Amino acid sequence: MCFLNHPLRAALRLLVLCAMLFAVAPAAHAAAETDAQSTLKHALDEVFATLNDPRYSEGANREEMLSKIENTVAVIFDYDEFAARTVGKKWRSFTPDQQTRFSKAFADLLRATYLERIKGYTGNGTTYTGQRSSTKGDKVEVQTLLDFEGKTVPVDYRMLQKDHWVIYDVIIEGVSLVKNYRTQFQELMTDGNKDAEALIERVQSRAEEVRKQNGKTE
Amino acid sequence: MKLFAKLLIAAGFIALTAHPAFADRNAALAYSAPEYPAGMYVVASSAQKQEPVYSRNTGLKTFDDDAEYSFDNNYEVNDPFEGWNRFWFGFNDVLYVDVLKPLHKGYSAVTPWELRAGVSNFFHNLLYPVRFVSCMLQGKFAEASVESARFVVNTTAGFGGLMNPAKEKKPLIKISDDEEDMGQTLGVWGFGEGFYLVWPFLGPSSLRDTAGLTGDYFLNPVSYVTPWTASTGLKSYNEFNSFDRQLADYEELKKAAVEPYTAIRNAYVQSRRSRVAR
């Protein structure tokens, strides 16, 4: 048993411990930081891969392409969180059923407008320029530049961690979508005291209008 | 051998205590979370996924999410002349979509894109004094020098500014990617927006940015063309020439909106604030 207490053996154990520490600790530092970004990167890469897939070139299999992108986006984009944040204070006065219907209608509107916009995308995709963390440390902002129609557009993704990292706000050229919609919904809800139902209806009909508009331009 | 072990223990201890400093090159920013002992990562390695992304650990800059999205946070702007503004908003909407859009379509059909790009580049290059003076007045000397360099390159190698060869060259100095104007300069100096204003033809603005536009007017060489009709004509032609880009942005914003007037007002204010901050 004196073998175990041998000083060399103890030193060796310490050495191994130190090595482990240095191997693990920097990884832990980097892990949380890259988790958000790598989750985002993975999803965006998938979207761009789908957009550039020759199978879908020149409008072929368009429905399939769109649903494929929709699925990818649905995983990383937290429509519920987004909806709750845009409605704001009054969100808690919505019944669970109203909350579901609202976030569904809102997701519909977002899909109708933004998927339409990237449909014919031909660009160099996204470059990642930096990250920020929230002061509480529970959220990450991934800053990117999107090559869009010959311009370089700064797009920041605000992300938080649920069972994986999800997007809860997108900031395009300094304009936060959540804040932008929030001011609109506030305006709608203070105007003549419209309630949840009226708001849901308004968002639904708007999504419908946009869809019709999309159909017309094709 | 005993000495060797002691030395190793000492080294390990020093490394352990010094370790957080390695990751913390940036000055610690204000945050209220408990500090983790450096060795905790080893102990808590299985729970790593839930670990928050503290700026102290990662060296990242921070944003205060709670304050930013708080409902007391004022990211709206005073709009005392809402009636007036809504009127001109409606007027501009018809002007942009029903008048200028078809006109510009016709214009695009009869002119080669090279001409349109050349005109746009030429006027942009000519507006160099606006950008340069605004950069200087905001203390952005690096950006001012980049603007100057671009002006020199585009005026010479770009045939008097008709082409934009400087666009391909990324500046070595890190500068903000927005272009400065006098409205932003006033913002940097601490002037608030005042209130929101919609101008016929020009679109969304604010009291401060309107004052800024006056400054831009005097810094724009085209303003000194005589007679004034020629000067105004040239400016209008430049605006019309690159109208399609602004229209695309406007139409997309309007399309995504549930309440277009509020949406565009808020987008204008947010975008100007972020440009002042950059």
Image: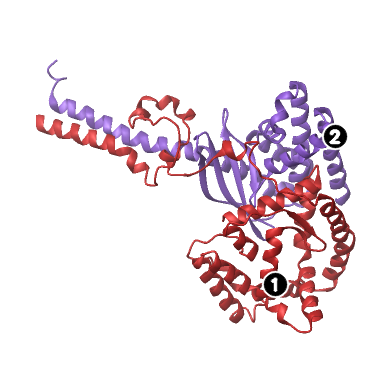
Chain colours: A purple, B red
In terms of image quadrants, where is residue B230?
bottom right
Q: Which residue is mark 2?
A: A192
- Would residue B73 be visible to someone looking at this image? yes
**Mark 1 to mark 2: distance in Å?**
42 Å
CB under 8 Å between discs 1 and 2: no
In terms of image quadrants, where is residue B42?
top left
- Residue B165 is left or right of residue A106, and the answer is left
Helix, strand or loop for disc 1: helix
- Residue A136 is left or right of residue A150, and the answer is left
B35 shown above or below B213: above
Query: Which residue is drawn at the image coordinates 85% and 65% (left, top)?
Result: B105
Q: Which one is in front, B228 or A154?
A: B228
Q: Amino acid at mark 1?
A: Tyr
- Residue A20 is left or right of residue B258, and the answer is left
* Circle 2 chain: A
* Circle 1 chain: B
- Residue B191 is left or right of residue A134, and the answer is right
Q: Which one is in front, A82 or B218?
A: B218
The x, y position of residue A207, in whole percent, is: 82, 39
The x, y position of residue A97, in whole percent, is: 77, 22
Q: Amino acid at mark 2?
A: Gly
Q: Which residue is mark 1?
A: B217
- Dot 2 crowding, Cα within 10 Å, few <14, some 14–19, many 20+: few
Q: Which mark, residue B79?
A: none
The x, y position of residue A73, in whole percent, is: 67, 38
The x, y position of residue A121, in whole percent, is: 71, 52
- Dot 1 crowding, Cα within 10 Å, few <14, some 14–19, many 20+: some
